[in-house]
Amino acid sequence: MRRPLPETGADWSDLKTRMLDYAGGDVRWREGKTAVYVFNAGPEVERVQKEAYVLFMSENGLGPMAFPSLKRMEEEVVGFGLSLLHGPDEAVGSITSGGTDSITMAMKAARDYARKAKGVKGPLNIVLPRSAHPAFDKAAAVMEIEVRRTPLKDFLADPEAMAAAADAATVMIVGSAPCFPFGLIDPIGALSQLALSRDLWLHVDACVGGYIAPFVRMNGGDVPPFDFELAGVRSMSADLHKYGYCAKGASTVFFRSAELQSFMIFDMSDWPGGRMVTPTLAGTRPGGAISAAWAVMNFLGVEGYRAKQGLVTRTRERIEAGVRALGFTVLGAPQLGLVAFSRDDVNCLAVWAKLRERGWFTSMTTEPAGLHLMLSPFHAEVADTYLADLAWALSAVTGQTAPVAVEARYS
Ligand SMILES: *Cc1c(COP(=O)(O)O)cnc(C)c1O
């Protein structure tokens, strides 16, 4: 809809007031009642994110020669990720704008590898467990690659079904660590075996898990091997702006070798503007997203992440116990920060809607219908309130079975 740009400019202080007024209708995530979209590691981390972002807000990661600072910070952040995810000496990576960007670029690399290195002709496909993120479908739509989603077994990827779906035109098979809907780590070990035995490109989508799983394991959690430690894993995605607690607009994509990564990089000189080499989907890359990631990772360090992730897993365990006491079944055995639970004698969507009346904004699952929480360190302070409000919502809707209308999520 057209809207005239104001003829004259306004004072910043007035604009700030108006923007805060716009924000009046937003979820109050700083109070901890939001368990989707936002990762709340507390005010100290938020301050580091903000100040570090603003320092390099105008700088552009597209120009590493002009901004060696950003190049250096990117290399250091990528190095941290590779060391956390058992990258071999030859492994490399890039910072991207987000999980969708990381996944799209990994798929482009796998597609070009299939065409150029393996000589695959004709239509291509990708094999995903049903729980994999829609970012793969989006990238496949852009690249005209067929998507083959295979059924789950106990909420996890089924390597046998994936083996049956893959063929000579399969450019990539995917396992999630963890998947978003249930927060469960797929059997990456078995997928790695499959990839090695059939020479398939295995991508591990650790967008939501890459920066929590290593620390949960250091804390003694029961996390199975899921990263480059497994020889069949060729690429990985891990989002800094999720459990890395960095500012939004930052993810990492990793490759087992520079040779594999070379299929991702776009190198173009056939125009009047000279040669332009871009590793990721973006041209201009916000310097602030890179500098904030660098600052937060160095601010927290292993110790800080272990403490934050310990809070997350303890909160998840508390919530699991609480929802079980209310008659819900936890879907699978989550190990990280996401948990989904359902009760087939209760309309879970109605419970979800009821909880919104008390300010809770969370996610849902549909197969089966259930409630879904993506927990942040800050949730430790509100877990008991959540459980009390869940008990209240449950009693309010018990007996109600008519489906409630729920607006679409855009996540
Ligand atoms: C969030 C997420 C993505 C997509 O990341 P965006 O940063 O939202 O683009 C992909 N896979 C999984 C498992 C995710 O949780």
Image: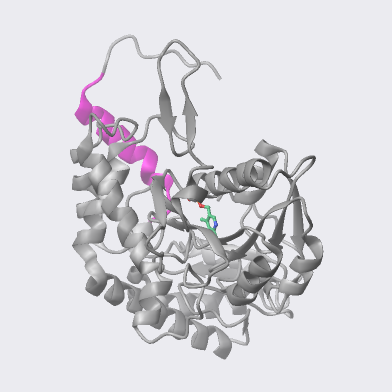
Q: Position of residue 78 (x, y in %)?
A: 34, 54
On the image, which quarter does residue 86 sit in?
A: bottom left
Per the rendered image, the range of residues in magenta is 10-28
Q: Give residue 299's position: percent from left, percent from top.
A: 19, 61
Which of the image's four quarters has the N terminus?
Answer: top right
- Relative height, residue 149 to residue 58 (above, below): below
Q: Nearer the viewer, residue 410 or 388?
A: 410
Residue 108 visible to an observer of this rendering? yes
Count of labels shown?
0
**Residue 108 image offset from top left, x and y in percent:** 59, 42
**Quarter where residue 21 is shown:** top left
Residue 372 to residue 411: above or below = below
Prevailing SS of the magenta stretch: helix
Q: Is residue 17 magenta?
A: yes
Q: Nearer the viewer, residue 319 or 215?
A: 215
Position of 262 with respect to 333 (left or right) is left
Taking the image as shown, residue 117 lies to the left or right of residue 400, namely left
Residue drawn at x 34%, y 31% is 62
Instruction: Please tell me which residue lies in front, 226 or 179.
Output: 226
Q: Using residue 269 as the reference point, say whether residue 179 is left or right of it.
A: right
* Residue 206, image x, y percentages: 50, 63
* Residue at horizontal 66 percent and vertical 46 percent from the top: 114
Residue pictured at 25% horizontal, 35% vertical: 57
| Closer to the camera in the image, 21 or 118 | 118
- In reply to whether residue 134 is colored magenta, the answer given is no
Can residue 244 be spotted in the picture?
no
